[in-house]
Image (tube, grey):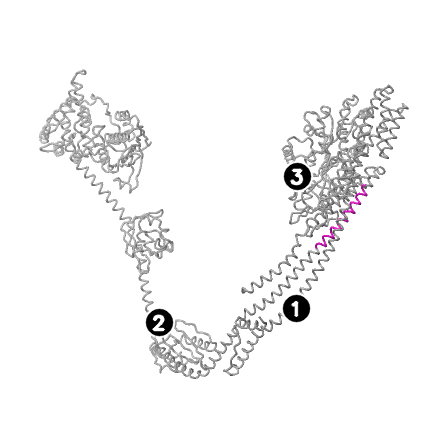
Amino acid sequence: MSRSAFIERIKPRWRDLGITRKFTLVFSLLLLFVVVLALTGSLSLLYVRGGEADIRNSVQVEQLVLEMDRGLERSRRLHAAFFLQYHALGLQQAHEQYAQASVREVSRVITLSKRLQQVLFQGQASPITGIRPADLNLYLASARRFADTSIEAVELITARAAPERGVESRLDSACSALDLLLSPYPELWLQQNQAALYLAEYLLKGRRSLLQSALNALQTIERALAGQELLSPSKGQAVARIITQFYTDADELLELDRGIHSKLRDFVLQEESVSPIAEKMVQQARGQVSQAKERIEQAYRITGMIMAALTMAAIGLLVLLARVMHNSITLQILDLTAAANAISCGRLDARVPGRNRDELGQLAAMFNDMAARIEDLVENLEKKVEQRTLELAVSERRFRYLLQDLPKIAVQGYDRQRRVIYWNRTSELLYGYSAEEAMGRQLEELIIPESMQAAVIRDIDNCFAQRSNIPSSELTLRHKDGSAVVVYSSHVVQYDGDEPVMYCVDIDLAELKLAQQERLQSQFLYRQLFDHSSSGVAVYEAVDDGADFVFRDFNRAGERIDRITREQLIGQRLSLAFPGVKESGLLEGYQGVWQSGEPFFLANAYYSDDRLQGWREVRAYRLPSGELVSVFDDITAQKEVEEEKSAVEQRLQAAQKMEAVGLLAGGVAHDLNNILSAIVSYPELLLCDLPPHSELRQPLETIKQAGERAAAVVADLLTVARGIASRKEVHSLEQLVLGYLDSAEFHYLRSANPEIRFEHRLSPGIPQISCSPVHLSKCIMNLMANGAEAIAGPGRVILSTSWQCPLHHWAIANGLEAKEYLVLRVEDSGEGIAPRDLAHIFEPFYTKKVMGKTSGTGLGLSVVWNTMRDHGGGVTVVSGTEGSCFELYLPLAETPAGPASDHGEDALPAILQGRGERILVVDDEKQQREIASSMLNRYGYQVVTAGSGEQALAYLQAHRVDLVLLDMLMAPGMNGRLTYEQMVQLVPGQRALVVSGFSASSDVKATLELGACGFLGKPYSLRQLGQAVKEALA
Amino acid sequence: MLTGVEKRCWLLIGALLLPPWLSSCSTQDTPPLECSDPLGCVRIAPEEPVQIGVLQALKGQVAPLGEAQLRGLELALAARGHRLLDHQVVLQIEDTGCTAEGGANAALKVIADPQTVAIFGTTCSGAAATAAKAMSSANLTMVSGNNSAPYLTSIGGEAAPGRQPGYFRTATNEENAGKAAAGYLYHQLGLRRAATINDNDIYTRGLTKSFKKAFLELGGELVLETSIHKGDRDMVPVLTAVARSGAQLLFFPLFQPEGNRVLLQARKIEALQDIVLISDGALIEQSFLDDVGVAAEGLYFIGPRRPEGPRVEQLDGAYRASYGEAPRVSYYLSGYEGADLLFHAIEQCALSARDGSLLVGRQALRDTLHAVRDYEGLGGSLSCDRFGDCSSPAFNVLRLDDHEQGLAGLERNVLYSWKPAE
């Protein structure tokens, strides 16, 4: 392909390329040349540096080798001097002067050899070539080897020539000693002298034969001494020992000399072996220096030629590229500049010729388009201006109408002198001036109150003068009729024309103010309601997606009810301020209200936490704003009243139930007692008449005991019926308890329950009580028996007393008065009472026991309950799985105890004997009259009987009796109370003893209040009757 | 932001400039430590050990003393974890034979190696005199824990004839040992006529000389002043001379075996039975006591005061743990102090390069040792004076009362103590 064809082929492609690519190509070519130049320079630099390093290395090797050679040579000379001089100077002097100097020199050479080794094997330059590694190592170690050899040689010399301890010295001493010993013997002395001379000559010449001759001479002495006794034995031994030592030392001397000669040969060998290596190393180093210099020169030549060629090529390339870039870029820019100049001069038809398709070509095309459009725009501009003017006039008119009719927005325009130049329709309505009235008048004389005029004038003047803004604000301006007009006023100044104009835009706030006032009144009313509500009111805001609530408001009633201030609650979480809100169910209720919007009501919500407890009635609802309102009341007091009322009602029902059962039981008991009187009394009377060993005594005893047991049951029944009419006396509770613990009943109970431990803990110094000892003992016995029966297997029953004053609410709840009581407590470790049985245990005949075992009548706890009621006290029970605890609350005695009765249980019937007093027995039952008569007769009383009250009264009208034994229930006719009422009228102070199988308490009490001496229950025993009569007559 | 083309251009330029730059940097390794010491330096490469020459008497009957010194050195090295400035330590151990020429030749072997940093030795003062001269000429430094001859450092506050630059010792200068012995014998025992025997060694000669001076100053009379040769076996002639001189005491500061022979043979001479015999610290060692046995009972010794304290007890324990036996001579303590002081001085003066190499200036090492003040030794502080003495002199007069109790019993039985201030 020819050059022109190539250029023609390239041209279109070149024109299509962008400017960036063109520049990239041009600069890449230039960079390539720079790269080639840099590479050439770098390579030549590296090459030259390598050569220089070789030169340095080789020169250093040469210097070190030469220096080592010189050092070794000096060391050898010093060492040789030591050999030559030690005899003359003395060993120590020669050692210091030559041997040590030699070693110091060789030490320096060793340092040099180390450096040489580093240069050869650790430097960057190539090692010396042409020398075997073994030779190199031999040379490097030569100094060390010379040092070792020379020191060994010095040691050998030392062993030979050391003063006193050297071999020479020892041999010399031996010769002297022999000389001394053998001097008296000429022949021997001659031999000794001969030996000494040979030795001296050997030491000078070093010929072995001389030393041998010395030894031979000594052997001659030895032989001479062996055959003759020339010397004394001690001298002979001394001579022999010296000669023997001489032989040893001579051997050592020979050995040392051999060693010394060996070392000397070693020195020669070392020198011979090392010198050629050193010479070769020096030659090699010098040769390498020459070679390196040649390489460097060659590198300079080649690099110079390459650099020159490259420089020429770079200049040519630069000229070529400059031309190409001029044609491609600079010419196009010049065309663009010329076209732009033409257009700026008004030649709108000027255009740029298109050359390339690069960015400048595109720019030229766009320039041409723009020029064409400008030409077109200039031609149509006037038409468009006229059209736009018309459109603006229409728009301005529309804006004026709009401004004129803006409702509630009054717009006024003022000139620099504050004269009205614009006054819209709303301004007319708001301020009462028509546009005609207002136009041309000053602002302050129209709508500005006098108090504001100065400030307004100043602000407007400033606004015009300094172009400062008048801030928008709420103002109270003046109506034509003088009334206030509240507006929100804003100001705008226009400087379009020659004269600036200020426009005021006033928004009528009358309706807004009215609405604000109404809202404030509403808020005030709400606040009053909120603060003065008797119920607590809290306002919450839901947080955590309704899981909890934060207090937003809290009224005074709420503060009082919940004993917390509003300030403490605002912003607090409900769950934190009232931790018990979840357990009370309120939180769940509030969450439900917040989610559903349905109101919530909880009539009885019990709230409890560490700080606050009480009952609440709560209503909650959600406000449209999303806040939650809770209205609540404290109903704790009401709940307490209700609970108290409920407890009282329950107790009343129980009492009525007991009363009914008692009435039933009482009726039955009366009849039974009358029947039992015969069963109990007659056997007793018969037993009194029977001889002690009569066979009838046992059956009669059995009949009597059966009657007594039946009477005990009836007595319980009567107690339950509250018909006991017991007589109270001041007594010690401790004595009662101890009496029970000493009773046969307790001993029997303990023996029957050997696995149960019975304990008693009596509180010391407790006051006395007013009680019926018999009934209270019965209560203790019943409770102890029940406790023992409740335990299956091992356990314990604890009987204890204490002195307590129960709390008011607890006392009320348990039917007691809030006063001091003695408490008798019976605890057992049994299995406890089932909750379903606990409410019925005091009811008569309610029993879980097996009938027939112990009492098993179902009256035991009823007796306890009734006895406590009769004593004005109460009984409580607490039972669980670990046992039961019964507590009897006994009121304290109001008066101290009287003197103890003279008649103990053990009083003998003889004491009860009467002194013939007359006793009237009044009973409607004949059998009863006979029994009483028989018994009283036995005590020596005179007995008369009457079958009714009427008969008794009739008898008393004519007779006087000491005592009337009066049955209470008699029928038909007068009962005991009526009889006694009339009896005392007839015979004032008539003594009477009331007798009854069942005492309707009211009649018995009334009779006793009338003056009857006492009460005796049926059936009674001979002893009881005697005792009661004796007391009544006393 | 750079365009892709620009980035490529800069990368190319960087690649072009890198080789020349690297070639210029390649020779710029860590610069070696420059030696400016006037006596030269020992340069120790990172992996090279620190080389210490050890010159001690390791053969013959003086060997226990030399061995004690070597063990003291080993214990001091062990206390540093067997490393010095994080370099291993190599010991070039040479025997001096406790003779002057042996010391000189041993020194030659050590100074021949230019890598020797310093010398620890010698055992005997006689060997030290020649070895110190040799090493000093080679610009080395030597520290001894056993040399006590005044000749090596100072006499009467002046430099002694044998004093060599670079020589230091932690053993006590026994210049005043003779004075201490004379004072005790004259004042405490009331003796007035004395005889002395030395072996011409600078150590023993120095001791008898200082004894003579002090005893005469006190008013005593020196009736015999004689000497023997090292290696002499028959001591009867010289002992006979002592008996005939009318001396009340014999001061014989000798090494083994000559000291042993003097004592044993003296015990057999009837005329010497009432004479007080007193020797020196060179015989305060277990091997001597073992050798002479009961003959040593009643023998007096003048020797340096043994260091005491918790550090000594601790070192004693370390000795027993390392060598499985009780110390046979207490001079391993001064050996430990000497080696410890030398190591401390090397640590102080050495320059460390980043690559771990060391540069120890020979004059710097000497200057460092001269500058030592109140360095914590075993029994007190060490301070080196301008003559090379680094410990304060203090001497005890001991007497062996029961040979069964051995060296420990002897060292416990201190009859008299002397310090310069006293």
The 10 Å Cα crowd at callout 1, few under 14, some 14 to 19, many 20 or more, is few
Q: Which residue is mark 2?
A: A509
User: Left or right: A831 with respect to A720?
Assistant: right
Label 3: which secondary element: helix
Of residues A1006 and B202, the one nearer the viewer is B202
Q: Gap between marks 2 and 3, in whole Å?
A: 103 Å
User: Left or right: A227 with respect to B382?
Assistant: right
Of the residues shown, which amino acid type is indicated by label 1? Answer: Met
Residue drawn at the location 86% of the way across and 35% of the way down = A205
Quarter of the image holding residue A711? Answer: top left
Magenta extent:
A53-79
Of the residues shown, which amino acid type is indicated by label 3? Answer: Leu
The 10 Å Cα crowd at callout 3, few under 14, some 14 to 19, many 20 or more, is some
The reply to whether the magenta stretch includes residue B169 is: no
The reply to whether the magenta stretch includes residue A60 is: yes
Residue drawn at the location 49% of the way across and 79% of the way down = A371
Of the residues shown, which amino acid type is indicated by label 2? Answer: Leu
Main SS of residues in magenta: helix
Q: Which residue is mark 1?
A: A312
